[in-house]
Image: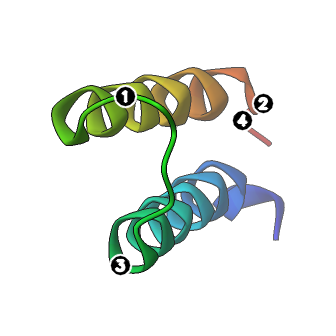
Amino acid sequence: MGAYNKFIVALLMMAGNGIRSHYGVDLGVDEAMATSLAGGITAALVWLVPNR
C-alpha cells in the first residue's frame, strides 16, 4: 500500500473536486479560481506525501 500513497492522495483530491463541481459547492470564488486552487492543493499534498 505504501507504494500507492501519492496516487491515493491524487485520487481523493480528484474525487473531492468532482464532488465540488457536480454538487455546486460554493467556495466563494469563480469556477476557474476554484479549479486552480484545487489543483494547487492537490499538487502540494502529493508533494508532501512521502515516497515509500
* Cα distance in 3D space between marks 3 and 4: 32 Å
Please provide percent x and percent y for residue 51. 72, 35
Element class at badge 1: loop
Amino acid on which the number 4 mark rests in the picture: Asn
Question: CA separation, marks 3 and 1?
Answer: 16 Å
Residue 52 lies left or right of residue 39; in this view the side is right
How busy is the neighbourhood of tag 4: few (under 14 within 10 Å), some, or many (20 plus)? few
**Amino acid of disc 1:** Val
Q: Position of residue 44 (x, y in %)?
A: 57, 21
Q: In which quarter of the image is the C terminus?
A: top right
Disc number placed over residue 22 in the picture, else none: 3
Task: Give the residue displayed 34% in from the left and 66% down from the top.
Answer: 21
Return the mark for residue 29: 1
Residue hosting label 4: 51
| For residue 50, above or below residue 2 | above
Label 3 close to label 4 by CB (< 8 Å): no
Q: How crowded is mark 2: few (under 14 residues within 10 Å), some or many (20 or more)?
A: few
The foreground one among 49 and 17 is: 17
The amino acid at mark 3 is His
User: The disc labelled 2 sits on which kind of residue?
Assistant: Pro
- Quadrant where the N terminus lies? bottom right
Q: Nearer the viewer, mark 4 or mark 1?
A: 1
Above or below residue 1? Residue 50 is: above
Q: Is residue 39 left or right of residue 15?
A: left
Outermost residue to the left:
32
Circles 2 and 4 in contact, beta carbons < 8 Å = yes
